[in-house]
Amino acid sequence: MMPRAFVLALALLGFVPAGEAQAQQALPDALMAEGRAAIARENYAGAIRAFARLLALPENAYSRDALEFLALSYERRGETARARLEYQKYLERYPSGDDAVRVRQRLAALQSAPAPAALRAPEAPAQGSRLMTYGSLSQFYYHGNSHIETQPVVANAFEPSSLSIIDQSALVTNVDLGARLLTEAHDNRFVFRDTNQQNFITGQDDLNRLTAAYYEYRYKPADLSARLGRQPGTTGGVLGRFDGALLGYGVTPRWRLNALAGEPVPLTGFRLDSRQRFYGLNTDLGPFGERWNANLYVVRQTVDGFADREAAGVELRYIAPQGSFISLVDYDTLFRQVNIGTIQANWQSARKTTYTFLLDRRKTPSLQTANAVIGEATSSVTSLVALYGEEELRRRAGALTATATSGAAGFAHPVSKAWQLGLDYRVMRISATEGTNNAPATPDTGNVHALSAQAIGSGLFSRRDVTTITLSGVAADTYTGAAFGITSRLPVGESWLFGGSLLLYAQDNDNGSTLKRVYGTLRTEYRLKANVTLEVEIGIDNTRSQSDISEESFDRGFLSLGYRWDF
C-alpha cells in the first residue's frame, strides 16, 4: 500500500491512480451535465452555480459552452444586466465562429428589448401544461492489464519475481433520466440517476450506485414543496446521499423554511450492520443586495437509536459579476468539534486576471459514532455499545477519525488571445489517528506542498482546441518530486475530436531510493449524431523504482471504449 503522503502528492500533481483515467475529465463532465440538466428543469440558480464552478477550473473543452450557458441562465432568470455582462465577456474571449454570431444576436436583442427570450428554444406558453423529458445514457468498457517485475540489487538477497495479470475488465453504465410536468400552479419532477459496474474478473463483485431517484412537487401559489426518495444531499447539514423526505415552505420571497428526515446512504466500502436515521431543520435566506444568500441548519442523527451525529452549521454565499465566495462551517455539538470548515473564492479583476483561493479543514471520515466500527469484528453499533459503553465508543470513533487540511491559492492571466498563464500553490496534510486496540494508529502525513505553473492555449490549431502545459514541484517531509504534464483536445471538422495527455514524474526519497513514472493517454471522440458520441481511449502507466536492495518495474496498459447518448 502506498504511503498516504505519496497518494496526496500524486493527487496534487494531477496523477490518477492506475485504472482511473476516466476520472481526469469527470469533474468538467459532471458540472456540464449538471448545469444543462438544471436549465432543462428551469432551475436557473442551480445552473448558474454549476457553470460558475466549471468556469473556475482551468480552461477546458467545456469553457466556451459553459460561458454561453451561464449567460443564458442569467437571461432566463430575468437578470438581464448580468446576462449582458456574461455575453460581452464571451465575445471578448471568443470573438469568432458561429456561436459568436448567435451570442451577438442574443446580446443585441437584450440591449433593445427588456423582455428576455430563449436562446436555443422558444418560450413556453404561460397557460396550459407542459411535459418535458430529458436524460442521457452512457456505456463504457474498461480493460487493464499489469506486469510487475522485481529484481534484487544485492546478490542472493532474494529471488527475482514476475507477475502479469488482467486487473480490470468491467462495463460501466450510467443512466440519467428526468421528467417534468408543469402547469400554472403545479410543478412535478422525477429524477433518476444510476451507475452500474459489471465486473468480468472472477472475485470482483458487481457494483451499483443509485445516486438519485426522487419525486418532487411544488405548489407555486403558496410556495410549498416536497421531495421524496433518494436524494443527492450535501445541503441542510446532510453530507451525502440519503433516502427520505425534504419539505419546504417559502415564508417570504427571501425566507424559506425546510424540514428533512431520512436515512443516510453508507459510503462505498463502509460496512455498517446498523441503522442510521436523521432529522433536521434549515432555512434559506436571501438574496440580499442581489449578492448574498445563506443556509442555516441543525441536524440530529442516530445509529441503532444511539446519538451518532448532532450538528449546527451555516453556509454563506456571495455571487457577483466578478466572482463568488462560498463558505461552510459544520460544528458537531456531540463531539464538540468542527466537522467541516471551508472557504472558497474566485475573482476576476478589471485586467481579466482570475484569482482563486481555497482553505478547507474537515474530519475524514465525517464525525459520527459509527466510525468506531472500523477494525472491529462486528459492524453492529448495538453490539459495540454493549461491549464498550456509549461514551467509550464515541471516544474510539474520535480516535479513528483524522483531520484533513488543505489550502490553495493561484491566479491566471490572459497574455494574448491564444494564451493564458497561471501559477498556483497547494498544500495538504492528513493528521495522525490515535487508533484502537483493533485498528492501528496512522501517522501524520506532514505538509505536502505543490507549486505549479500553467500555460493554457486555445485556438492554436482550430477554432475550439485547448492545450494545457503544466510544470510542477512537490515537497514532503521525506521526499521531493517534479512533474511535467501536457494535455490537448483538438476538434477536427464537426464530428471528430482527438486528444491526449502525457505526465512525467520523478521523485527522490530521503532514504536514497528513487521513483520515475510515465503516464499517457490517447483519446478519440466521434459525434455520430447531434446527441450521440462514440469514444475510445488507450493509455499506459509505467513506474520504475530503485532502492539499495531492489529494482521494481510496474507496467500497465488500459483502454476504454463506449458511447454517450443525450436525449
Image (cartoon, grey):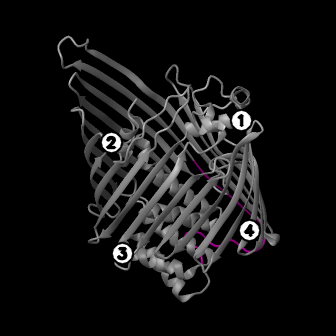
Is disc 4 in contact with disc 3, using a CB cutoff of under 8 Å?
no
Residue ID for mark 2: 521
**Residue 36 visible to the viewer:** no
Residue 446, percent across and down? 38, 44
Looking at this view, is 413 or 540 the one in front?
413
Give the amino acid at mark 3. Answer: Lys
Q: Residue at x 35, y 66 (%)?
A: 411
Give the amino acid at mark 1. Answer: Glu
Looking at this view, is 275 or 405 the one in front?
405
The mark lying in front, picked from 3 and 1, is 1
Give the amino acid at mark 4. Answer: Arg
Query: Which mark, by number, is residue 352?
Result: 3
The mark lying in front, picked from 2 and 3, is 3
Q: Is residue 469 magenta?
A: no
Q: Secondary structure at mark 1?
A: helix
Is disc 4 in contact with disc 1, using a CB cutoff of under 8 Å?
no
The mark lying in front, picked from 1 and 2, is 1
Q: Which residues are magenta?
A: 117-136
Q: Secondary structure at mark 3?
A: loop
For marks 4 and 1, give the CA distance: 37 Å
Q: Main secondary structure of the magenta part?
A: loop
For marks 4 and 2, give the CA distance: 48 Å
Residue 320, percent across and down? 51, 75
**Residue 332 visible to the viewer:** yes
The mark lying in front, picked from 4 and 3, is 4
The mark lying in front, picked from 4 and 1, is 1
Residue ID for mark 4: 256
Residue ID for mark 1: 390
**Lower position in the chain sequence, tag 4 or tag 1:** 4
Residue 105, percent across and down? 48, 79
Q: Residues within 10 Å of mark 1 (few under 14, many from 20)?
A: some
Q: Residue at x 49, y 43 (%)?
A: 563
